[in-house]
């Protein structure tokens, strides 16, 4: 399964930005707009047709037990910044292990925890795991930062003693000599297009919108920029104002207050994360405008779902949060059954839209599905 770049392919990449050997095909499988300007590939360039959708369907369905037998538990090393405040890592660890239990795959895990800023500690852990390669069957690496940890991803992926999976990123770097066996993440770009389709279907064409954007960079370019481009191109929407609220509640409050005063023609306020959405809702409630403005959030967190239940937030692209861990368990099963070639190189967790036209039971069911392994509500730490 290891995906090695040959010298000739390196030359081809340097000249034409083109090619990887992934054991089955040459990457990229197709070229999408902007490929020459990026140092990474997007999922649509590296996933064979239908493979992502097939794994998403498996992850969303009841577990089908592992068909084989194991002499010993599989050994899994996890190198990730799970000592940070985000519960992404803990939730997906729970999803991974509980799905493995459902699949009937015995396992033992060894965790190498760090904080997001402890880049050198992650390097130390990666070196340790690589040196002890014979102890592990699978290595799950959650990079503290993708570019900084690129060499470690490359080194781990080159080792044939174990399969390497990357969590929390979905942009395979072009200059890796060795691609990991799979990447697992959620895509803000995919979420933006899902939200675009929903908004156009619900609100129609020629709508006037304002935005609370985050911080300039790839995440906001996708969450805000891709959404804006989609509704403007497909629906003829007009964007009258864009406020950079830095993903902070205060930024959402200030941006919304300005929009309400200076741009009363804006009937939609798009917020690029939960914190700004909560600030935006607060600003609207303070002047009694929450029923007049159609407000969106991002991520489908508990705070957003509660705001939808209260009638203050109208819609949000909601991540099925436990999908990453569950998909990794399914990848391990596929590998054990000799079906690794069926997997996409990049797995994206499912994103659907939660909205105010859903019943309380429908919202509850969506929340239960998103956190079906790790549990609804705050994790005990």
Image: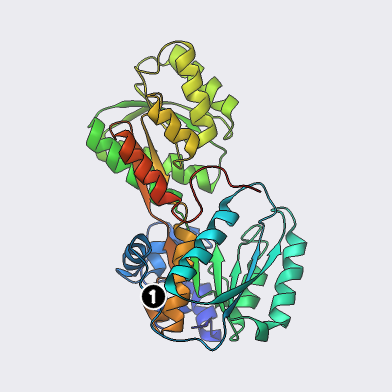
Task: Kindly identify the residue that appears in the image at 54 percent across and 89 percent down.
Answer: 71
As displayed, is residue 177 above or below residue 194?
below
Left or right: residue 259 compared with residue 173: left
Left or right: residue 116 compared with residue 331: right
Task: Kindly identify the residue that appears in the image at 66 percent across and 86 percent down.
Answer: 134
The quadrant holding residue 260 is top left
The quadrant holding residue 27 is bottom left
Left or right: residue 241 compared with residue 97: left
Nearest the viewer among 265 and 312 is 312
Q: According to the image, label 1 marks what residue?
A: 65
Disc 1 secondary structure class: loop
Q: Position of residue 106 (x, y in %)?
A: 53, 77
Q: Position of residue 342 (x, y in %)?
A: 36, 77
Nearest the viewer among 256 and 263 is 256
Within 10 Å of disc 1 (Cα), the crowding (few <14, some 14-19, many 20+) is some
Nearest the viewer among 313 and 95 is 95
Q: Residue furthest bottom?
A: 71
Q: Position of residue 179 (x, y in %)?
A: 53, 75
Q: Position of residue 370 (x, y in %)?
A: 42, 50
């Amino acid at each position: 399964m290891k995906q090695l770049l040959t010298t000739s392919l390196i030359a081809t990449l340097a000249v034409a930005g083109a090619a990887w050997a992934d054991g089955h095909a040459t990457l990229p499988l197709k070229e999408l707009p902007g490929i020459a300007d990026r140092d990474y590939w997007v999922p649509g360039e590296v996933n064979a047709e239908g493979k992502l959708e097939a794994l998403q369907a498996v992850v969303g369905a009841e577990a089908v037990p592992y068909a084989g037998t194991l002499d010993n538990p599989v050994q899994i090393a996890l190198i990730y910044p799970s000592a940070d405040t985000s519960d992404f890592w803990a939730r997906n660890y729970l999803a991974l292990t509980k799905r493995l239990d459902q699949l009937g795959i015995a396992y033992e895990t060894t965790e190498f925890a760090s904080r997001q800023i402890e880049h050198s500690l992650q390097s130390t852990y990666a070196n340790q795991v690589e040196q002890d390669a014979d102890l592990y069957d699978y290595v799950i690496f959650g990079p503290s930062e993708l570019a900084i940890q690129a060499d470690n991803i490359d080194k781990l992926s080159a080792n044939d003693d174990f399969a390497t999976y990357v969590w929390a990123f979905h942009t395979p770097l072009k200059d890796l000599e060795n691609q990991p066996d799979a990447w697992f993440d959620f895509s803000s770009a995919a979420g933006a297009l899902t939200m675009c389709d929903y908004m156009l279907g619900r609100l129609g064409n020629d709508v006037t919108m304002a935005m609370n954007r985050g911080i300039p960079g790839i995440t906001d370019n996708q969450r805000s920029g891709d959404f804006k481009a989609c509704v403007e191109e497909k629906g003829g929407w007009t964007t009258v104002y864009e406020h950079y609220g830095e993903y902070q509640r205060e930024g959402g409050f200030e941006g919304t207050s300005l929009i309400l005063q200076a741009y009363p023609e804006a009937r939609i306020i798009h917020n690029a994360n939960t914190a700004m959405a909560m600030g935006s809702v607060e600003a609207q409630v303070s002047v009694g405008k929450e029923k007049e403005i159609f407000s969106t959030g991002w991520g489908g967190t508990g705070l957003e779902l509660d705001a939808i239940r209260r009638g203050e937030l109208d819609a949000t692209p909601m991540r099925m949060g436990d999908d990453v861990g569950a998909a990794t368990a399914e990848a391990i099963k596929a590998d054990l059954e000799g079906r690794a070639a069926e997997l996409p190189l990049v797995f994206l967790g499912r994103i659907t839209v939660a909205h105010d036209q859903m019943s309380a039971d429908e919202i509850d069911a969506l929340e239960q599905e998103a956190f079906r392994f790790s549990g609804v509500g705050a994790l005990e730490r």
